Image: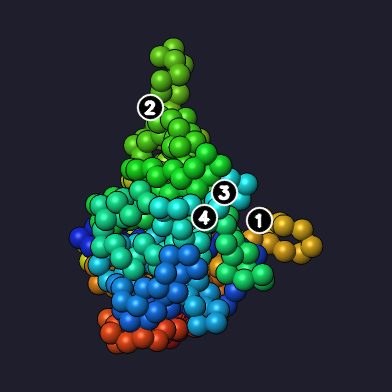
Amino acid sequence: MCTAVNYKTKDHYFGRSLDYEYSYHETVTITPRNYPFHFRKAGKMDNHYAMIGMAFVVEDYPLYYDAVNEKGLAMAGLNFPGNADYKEEEEGKDNVASFEFIPWVLGQCADLDEARRLLTRMNLVNIGFSSELPPSPLHWIISDREGSLTVESVKEGLNVYENPVGVLTNNPPFDMQMFHLNHYMGLSTEPMENHFSKELPMEAYSRGMGALGLPGDLSSASRFVKVAFTKMNAISGDSESESISQFFHILGSVAQQRGCVHLGEGQYEITIYSSCCNTDKGVYYYTTYENSQITAVDMHHEDLDGSGLTNYPLVEGQHIFMQN
């Protein structure tokens, strides 16, 4: 399961956590402007916006989990089992496979307005990358500094939602997640007041009691509420250090620790990586489960007019600064 967040201070930041039981040896991957994308049903894209993100690279093809293009448009795919429904090819539509969706959008859209127009022609088709890599059941968040969209291909068709909270987790579908927030409208960052009864001398005995009832479990529905509350109330300075630090604290509010989500046969879901990309500067920051030190890759330090992928393996193993 996963969590994605859109956040803005002086600059715009976008990132996600990937929660799973094992890694596919993903890498921070930069796709330059002249890398040729061959789409299964939508032709070839020889020239496009450059992008950086986390990808599983197979046969020199970047299967992006999340990415940001050079214009600042960001996108992430999150697990959506039991609800994602991909279609047959349809004439007059842009027939794109789920594994192609991120480069299809980020390759040609500079902002959300352009993405909205592109999505009116979208048909997500039921095609896997290979027999070993069938279609993953996903839904997506697309963001720029002005807002976010959620895209879900379900049995009824393609749903495109405005996403005012700028967060996404997994199930249930996004409209149900948003309705679920109504249950928590009484939460507050302020000290709790006694509304129970004027006749009872109740007092707040601890800080933070205004948020009593905020979910703390690791289900996707609870993580949506928890990260939405945290993100919507987060306060950060405008510096790069303050901004990325706060972003990782927001994602950390729903981090998964090994042992807390047992999947059977000795397997546990953990937060494999967390990412935060400054979409204005094209710098992709990340941490991993075993390495809480923030590592950064700057897409503008590479040749963005090239035609080959650049891959940076994740820095694993805890890095500790010894002060004495």
35 lies left or right of 65: left
| Tag in front: 4 or 3 | 4
Spot the residue most to the top.
199
Q: State the residue at coordinates (57%, 62%).
A: 127
Q: Which residue is mark 4?
A: 89
Earlier-in-chain disc, 2 versus 4 = 4
Sooner in the amino-acid sequence: mark 1 or mark 2: 2
Q: Amino acid at mark 2?
A: Glu
Say what amino acid the circle numbered 4 marks: Glu
**Circle 3: residue type:** Asp
Q: Name the residue at 66% across, 55% down.
A: 261
SS for tag 3? loop
Q: Earlier in the sequence, mark 4 or mark 1?
A: 4
Q: What's the CA distance linking mark 1 and mark 2?
A: 33 Å
Label located before the other in sequence (2 or 3)? 3
CA distance separating discs 4 and 3: 13 Å
Pair 4/1: label in front: 4
* Residue 72 rendering spot, x and y as whole percentages: 27, 65
Residue lying at 35% horizontally and 77% vertically, measured from the top left: 46
Q: Residues within 10 Å of mark 3 (few under 14, many from 20)?
A: many
Q: List x then y, in percent, for residue 253.
A: 47, 54
Q: Which residue is mark 1?
A: 260
Q: Position of residue 37 (x, y in %)?
A: 42, 75
- Front in this rendered view, residue 250 or 88: 88
In what element is the residue under mark 1? Answer: loop
Residue that label 3 marks? 85
Label 4: which secondary element: loop
Q: Which residue is mark 2?
A: 193
Q: CA distance from mark 3 to mark 1?
A: 30 Å
Looking at the picture, does residue 86 appear above or below residue 164?
below
Amino acid found under the numbered disc labelled 1: Cys
